Protein backbone atom coordinates (compact mmCIF):
# COMPACT_ATOMS: atom_id res chain seq x y z
CA UNK A 1 0.00 0.00 0.00
CA UNK A 2 2.84 2.37 0.91
CA UNK A 3 4.62 1.51 -2.35
CA UNK A 4 1.47 2.28 -4.32
CA UNK A 5 1.02 5.60 -2.56
CA UNK A 6 4.64 6.55 -3.19
CA UNK A 7 4.35 5.71 -6.89
CA UNK A 8 1.19 7.83 -7.16
CA UNK A 9 2.98 10.80 -5.57
CA UNK A 10 5.87 10.43 -7.99
CA UNK A 11 3.55 10.30 -10.98
CA UNK A 12 1.67 13.40 -9.83
CA UNK A 13 4.94 15.30 -9.34
CA UNK A 14 6.16 14.30 -12.80
CA UNK A 15 2.88 15.42 -14.37
CA UNK A 16 3.02 18.78 -12.60
CA UNK A 17 6.63 19.33 -13.71
CA UNK A 18 5.64 18.62 -17.29
CA UNK A 19 2.63 20.91 -17.09
CA UNK A 20 4.62 23.94 -15.90
CA UNK A 21 6.79 24.32 -19.02
CA UNK A 22 3.74 23.80 -21.23
CA UNK A 23 1.86 26.45 -19.25
CA UNK A 24 4.76 28.90 -19.60
CA UNK A 25 4.96 28.26 -23.33
CA UNK A 26 1.23 28.86 -23.64
CA UNK A 27 1.42 32.11 -21.67
CA UNK A 28 4.40 33.26 -23.76
CA UNK A 29 2.55 32.49 -26.96
CA UNK A 30 -0.44 34.48 -25.74
CA UNK A 31 1.78 37.46 -24.90
CA UNK A 32 3.59 37.41 -28.23
CA UNK A 33 2.40 40.06 -30.64
CA UNK A 34 2.93 40.65 -34.34
CA UNK A 35 1.64 43.80 -36.02
CA UNK A 36 2.18 45.48 -39.39
CA UNK A 37 2.18 49.23 -39.87
CA UNK A 38 2.87 50.63 -43.36
CA UNK A 39 4.73 47.49 -44.44
CA UNK A 40 6.89 47.61 -41.28
CA UNK A 41 6.63 44.52 -39.06
CA UNK A 42 6.85 44.69 -35.25
CA UNK A 43 7.40 41.54 -33.22
CA UNK A 44 7.36 41.79 -29.43
CA UNK A 45 5.90 40.57 -26.16
CA UNK A 46 3.26 42.49 -24.18
CA UNK A 47 2.21 41.39 -20.69
CA UNK A 48 -0.04 42.32 -17.80
CA UNK A 49 2.51 42.34 -14.95
CA UNK A 50 1.84 39.98 -12.08
CA UNK A 51 4.10 42.01 -9.78
CA UNK A 52 4.11 45.68 -8.76
CA UNK A 53 5.82 47.81 -11.39
CA UNK A 54 7.91 50.74 -10.24
CA UNK A 55 6.87 53.90 -12.03
CA UNK A 56 9.57 56.51 -12.66
CA UNK A 57 7.93 59.90 -13.28
CA UNK A 58 10.64 60.97 -15.76
CA UNK A 59 10.87 57.81 -17.90
CA UNK A 60 8.95 56.70 -20.97
CA UNK A 61 6.96 53.47 -20.69
CA UNK A 62 6.05 51.46 -23.77
CA UNK A 63 2.76 49.58 -23.72
CA UNK A 64 0.36 47.87 -26.08
CA UNK A 65 -3.35 48.50 -26.61
CA UNK A 66 -5.73 47.95 -29.52
CA UNK A 67 -3.03 46.78 -31.94
CA UNK A 68 -0.95 49.88 -31.25
CA UNK A 69 2.33 50.44 -29.41
CA UNK A 70 1.99 53.51 -27.21
CA UNK A 71 4.49 55.39 -25.06
CA UNK A 72 3.78 57.53 -22.02
CA UNK A 73 6.06 59.36 -19.62
CA UNK A 74 5.51 58.23 -16.05
CA UNK A 75 2.77 55.65 -16.58
CA UNK A 76 0.88 53.16 -18.76
CA UNK A 77 -2.60 51.78 -19.29
CA UNK A 78 -2.39 48.44 -21.04
CA UNK A 79 0.00 45.57 -21.58
CA UNK A 80 3.62 46.53 -20.92
CA UNK A 81 6.23 45.56 -23.47
CA UNK A 82 8.43 42.95 -21.82
CA UNK A 83 11.00 40.73 -23.49
CA UNK A 84 12.50 40.79 -26.96
CA UNK A 85 11.49 43.50 -29.42
CA UNK A 86 12.26 43.37 -33.15
CA UNK A 87 11.33 45.63 -36.04
CA UNK A 88 11.67 44.61 -39.70
CA UNK A 89 11.78 46.68 -42.89
CA UNK A 90 9.37 45.82 -45.72
CA UNK A 91 12.14 43.71 -47.33
CA UNK A 92 12.31 41.69 -44.05
CA UNK A 93 15.70 43.16 -43.12
CA UNK A 94 16.25 44.10 -39.51
CA UNK A 95 15.50 47.70 -38.56
CA UNK A 96 15.81 47.56 -34.78
CA UNK A 97 16.33 44.94 -32.07
CA UNK A 98 16.48 45.08 -28.29
CA UNK A 99 14.65 44.16 -25.11
CA UNK A 100 12.14 45.68 -22.75
CA UNK A 101 11.75 45.10 -19.01
CA UNK A 102 8.47 46.24 -17.47
CA UNK A 103 7.87 48.65 -20.34
CA UNK A 104 11.34 50.22 -20.29
CA UNK A 105 14.20 49.66 -22.79
CA UNK A 106 16.90 47.56 -21.21
CA UNK A 107 20.23 46.08 -22.28
CA UNK A 108 21.85 46.42 -25.70
CA UNK A 109 19.85 47.87 -28.58
CA UNK A 110 20.91 47.86 -32.22
CA UNK A 111 19.52 49.72 -35.23
CA UNK A 112 20.17 49.26 -38.96
CA UNK A 113 19.81 51.33 -42.11
CA UNK A 114 17.63 50.02 -44.96
CA UNK A 115 19.85 47.56 -46.76
CA UNK A 116 21.41 46.05 -43.66
CA UNK A 117 24.22 48.43 -42.65
CA UNK A 118 24.56 48.93 -38.91
CA UNK A 119 23.30 52.33 -37.70
CA UNK A 120 23.84 52.40 -33.95
CA UNK A 121 24.61 50.37 -30.83
CA UNK A 122 23.27 51.79 -27.57
CA UNK A 123 22.98 50.42 -24.04
CA UNK A 124 19.98 51.02 -21.79
CA UNK A 125 19.21 50.46 -18.13
CA UNK A 126 15.63 50.82 -16.85
CA UNK A 127 14.71 53.31 -19.54
CA UNK A 128 17.89 55.40 -19.54
CA UNK A 129 20.78 55.32 -21.98
CA UNK A 130 23.90 54.46 -20.05
CA UNK A 131 27.41 53.30 -20.89
CA UNK A 132 29.07 53.08 -24.27
CA UNK A 133 27.41 53.86 -27.59
CA UNK A 134 28.53 53.90 -31.23
CA UNK A 135 26.88 55.51 -34.27
CA UNK A 136 27.70 54.69 -37.89
CA UNK A 137 27.13 56.36 -41.23
CA UNK A 138 25.41 54.63 -44.15
CA UNK A 139 28.73 53.21 -45.36
CA UNK A 140 29.35 51.42 -42.07
CA UNK A 141 32.07 53.80 -40.84
CA UNK A 142 32.02 55.19 -37.32
CA UNK A 143 30.34 58.56 -37.07
CA UNK A 144 30.34 59.13 -33.31
CA UNK A 145 31.15 57.18 -30.15
CA UNK A 146 31.40 57.77 -26.44
CA UNK A 147 29.38 57.32 -23.25
CA UNK A 148 25.99 58.11 -21.83
CA UNK A 149 25.37 58.80 -18.17
CA UNK A 150 21.77 58.96 -16.96
CA UNK A 151 20.54 59.40 -20.55
CA UNK A 152 22.93 62.31 -21.25
CA UNK A 153 26.18 62.49 -23.18
CA UNK A 154 29.07 62.40 -20.74
CA UNK A 155 32.84 62.68 -20.94
CA UNK A 156 34.87 62.64 -24.13
CA UNK A 157 32.84 62.08 -27.30
CA UNK A 158 34.60 61.33 -30.57
CA UNK A 159 33.15 62.66 -33.81
CA UNK A 160 34.66 61.18 -36.98
CA UNK A 161 35.09 62.76 -40.38
CA UNK A 162 34.86 60.96 -43.71
CA UNK A 163 38.66 60.94 -44.04
CA UNK A 164 39.07 58.96 -40.82
CA UNK A 165 40.19 61.84 -38.64
CA UNK A 166 38.21 62.76 -35.54
CA UNK A 167 37.75 65.50 -33.00
CA UNK A 168 37.11 65.06 -29.29
CA UNK A 169 34.40 67.06 -27.55
CA UNK A 170 33.98 66.88 -23.80
CA UNK A 171 30.41 66.79 -22.51
CA UNK A 172 29.16 67.58 -19.02
CA UNK A 173 25.51 66.88 -18.14
CA UNK A 174 24.68 66.41 -21.81
CA UNK A 175 26.18 69.71 -22.95
CA UNK A 176 29.53 70.33 -24.67
CA UNK A 177 32.08 72.00 -22.44
CA UNK A 178 33.04 75.40 -23.78
CA UNK A 179 36.72 76.11 -24.03
CA UNK A 180 37.97 79.55 -23.05
CA UNK A 181 39.52 81.30 -26.02
CA UNK A 182 43.16 82.12 -25.52
CA UNK A 183 44.34 85.47 -26.84
CA UNK A 184 47.73 85.16 -28.43
CA UNK A 185 49.64 87.87 -30.25
CA UNK A 186 50.78 87.17 -33.74
CA UNK A 187 54.51 87.02 -34.26
CA UNK A 188 54.54 89.99 -36.63
CA UNK A 189 52.28 92.10 -34.44
CA UNK A 190 53.84 95.34 -33.22
CA UNK A 191 53.36 96.81 -29.75
CA UNK A 192 50.43 99.17 -29.51
CA UNK A 193 52.49 102.16 -28.22
CA UNK A 194 55.29 101.84 -30.71
CA UNK A 195 55.54 104.29 -33.61
CA UNK A 196 57.17 103.61 -36.87
CA UNK A 197 60.45 105.45 -37.17
CA UNK A 198 61.25 107.09 -40.48
CA UNK A 199 64.83 107.92 -41.25
CA UNK A 200 65.10 111.58 -42.06
CA UNK A 201 68.07 113.25 -43.76
CA UNK A 202 70.39 115.10 -41.44
CA UNK A 203 69.73 118.81 -41.23
CA UNK A 204 72.39 121.05 -42.73
CA UNK A 205 73.86 123.63 -40.34
CA UNK A 206 72.53 127.15 -40.91
CA UNK A 207 74.96 129.76 -42.22
CA UNK A 208 75.63 132.56 -39.84
CA UNK A 209 74.37 135.85 -41.24
CA UNK A 210 76.65 138.89 -41.05
CA UNK A 211 75.45 141.88 -39.19
CA UNK A 212 74.63 144.74 -41.59
CA UNK A 213 76.39 147.18 -39.25
CA UNK A 214 79.66 145.41 -39.79
CA UNK A 215 79.67 146.40 -43.45
CA UNK A 216 79.37 150.06 -42.73
Image (cartoon, helix red, strand yellow):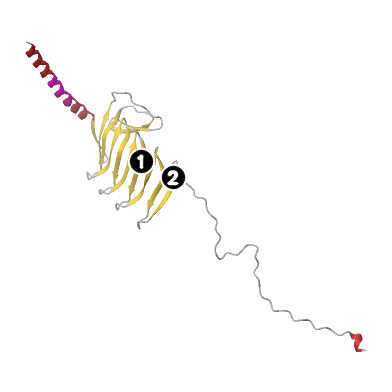
Along the line of sight, which residue is nearer the eye, 152 or 70? Answer: 152
Q: On the image, numbered disc 1 is attached to which residue?
A: 131
Is 176 positioned to the left or the right of 45 in the image?
right
Secondary structure, mark 2, is strand
Considering the image in quadrants, where does the N terminus appear? top left
Task: Report the residue at 54% width, 58% height from top.
Answer: 184
Q: Quadrant of residue 72?
A: top left
- State which quarter of the image contains the C terminus: bottom right
Q: Quadrant of residue 74?
A: top left
Magenta stretch encompasses residue 70? no
Helix, strand or loop for disc 1 = strand
In this rendering, is residue 202 above or below 114? below
Q: Residue at x 28, y 31 (%)?
A: 82
Q: Residue furthest top?
A: 1
Q: Please determine whether, in this image, residue 85 is positioned above or below residue 25.
A: below
Percent coordinates x, y for residue 110 in the rendering? 29, 42
**Local crowd at mark 2 within 10 Å, few (<14), some, or many (≥20)?**
some
- Give residue 187's quadrant in the image: bottom right
Q: Is residue 76 above or below residue 205?
A: above
| Residue interval drawn in magenta | 13-21
Nearer-the-camera pick, 153 or 89: 153
The outermost residue toward the front is 2
Place of residue 68 in the rendered image (x, y in percent of width and height, measured from the top left) = 29, 33
Q: Is residue 17 above or below residue 68?
A: above
Q: Which residue is mark 2?
A: 171
Residue 39 pos. (x, y %): 25, 41
Marker disc for residue 156: none
Going 30% across and 23% down the picture, which residue do you hit? 51
Q: Residues within 10 Å of mark 1 (few under 14, many from 20)?
A: some
Front position in the image: 74 or 108: 108
| Gap in angstroms between the C-alphas marked 2 and 1 | 14 Å
Q: Main secondary structure of the magenta part?
A: helix
Amino acid sequence: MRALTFSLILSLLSLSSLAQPEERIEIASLNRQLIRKKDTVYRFYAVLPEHPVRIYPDRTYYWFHSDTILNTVGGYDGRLLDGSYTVFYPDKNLAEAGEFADGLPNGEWRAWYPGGMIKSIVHWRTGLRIGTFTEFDRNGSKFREGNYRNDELSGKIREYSSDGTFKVIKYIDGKPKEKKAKKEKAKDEKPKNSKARVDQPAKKPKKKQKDSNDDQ
